[in-house]
Image: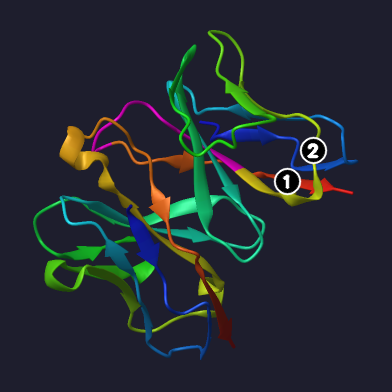
């Protein structure tokens, strides 16, 4: 069965520090990969997505992620975090693409809670 | 353009009661997904519906849980005879269609507390 692992459950950084959140998935076929963010009290919002092409994907708010197929990884990065980046970050995979993309069903990791100290 | 609307935001039920969670997808969206988030866990897929059809219910518990998405009105997730273990955040997401160019849009969730 497909699964997604996020190794860091809680991360605490000071403003201007660099961020990298790990995400690994287990699935041998074609995948679409996503990072979602959930700010306190709000709904999940899409940060960025990878479908194909350039493995370095740029998203909103200065975030980027790199798809490394050989490592089954899709790590999220930001060079300099801000206090407003405090949120929970979820990595997700859609493994339905090998079946014609017949579903947008996502499998999520357990999330990483990021706290940025001013 | 209103997003995915879920209500209520918070729901408290005693053990044995029924819980009804509502989800109105974004305008023009006919695909609805329900997810559950238990404390300290990620979001777990429950069910995928299109108008009047359940497409994939592989994540739904076998008993007490049901979902519908009628031709008119919101999608409903119904939990009968709730137990403490049902306490969780329930998220609804919608998309206009399947496919790579149609990522999911999530609602704010309903936080169910069973006392």
Q: Quadrant of the C terminus of chain A?
A: bottom right
Please tell me how crowded label 2 is: few (under 14), some (14-19), or many (20+) other residues with Cα within 10 Å: many
Asked whether, in this view, residue B100 is left or right of residue B28, the answer is left
Secondary structure of the residue carrying numbered label 1:
helix
- Chain ID, mark 2: B
Please tell me how crowded label 1 is: few (under 14), some (14-19), or many (20+) other residues with Cα within 10 Å: some
In depth, the one of B42 and A46 nearer the eye is B42
Secondary structure of the residue carrying numbered label 2:
loop
When asked about the image quadrant of residue B56, the answer is: top left
Q: Which residue is mark 2?
A: B82
- Chain ID, mark 1: B
Marks 1/2: CA–CA distance: 6 Å
Q: Which residue is most to the left?
A: A53
In the rendered image, residue B8, in percent from the top left (x then y), is placed at: 75, 36
Residue B40 inside the magenta-drawn segment: no
**Residue numbers of the magenta segment:** B91-101
Residue B108 appears in the picture as rendered? no
Asked whether, in this view, residue A37 is left or right of residue B99, the answer is right
In depth, the one of B90 and B86 nearer the eye is B86
Q: Residue B86, labelled with which disc?
A: 1
Q: Residue A84, labelled with which disc?
A: none
In the rendered image, residue B33, in percent from the top left (x then y), is placed at: 48, 34
């Amino acid at each position: 069965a497909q699964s997604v692992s996020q190794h860091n459950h809680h991360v605490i950084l000071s403003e201007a520090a660099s961020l990298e959140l790990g995400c690994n998935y287990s699935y041998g076929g074609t995948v679409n990969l996503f990072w979602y963010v959930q700010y306190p009290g709000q709904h999940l919002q899409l940060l960025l997505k990878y479908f194909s092409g350039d493995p370095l994907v740029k998203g909103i708010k200065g975030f980027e992620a790199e798809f490394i197929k050989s490592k089954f990884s899709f790590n999220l990065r930001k060079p300099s975090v801000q206090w407003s980046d405090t949120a929970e970050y979820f990595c997700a995979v859609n493994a339905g693409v090998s079946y014609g993309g017949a579903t947008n069903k996502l499998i999520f990791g357990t999330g990483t809670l990021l706290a940025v100290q001013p | 353009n209103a997003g995915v609307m879920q209500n209520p935001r918070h729901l408290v039920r005693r053990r044995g009661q029924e819980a009804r969670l509502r989800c109105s997808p974004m305008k023009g969206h006919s695909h609805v997904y329900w997810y559950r988030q238990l404390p300290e866990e990620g979001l777990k897929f429950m069910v995928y519906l299109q108008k009047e059809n359940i497409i994939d219910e592989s994540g739904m518990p076998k008993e007490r849980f049901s979902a519908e998405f009628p031709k008119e009105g919101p999608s409903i997730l119904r939990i009968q005879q709730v137990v403490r273990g049902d306490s969780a955040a329930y998220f609804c997401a919608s998309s206009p269609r399947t496919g790579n160019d149609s990522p999911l849009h999530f609602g704010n969730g309903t936080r169910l507390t069973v006392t």
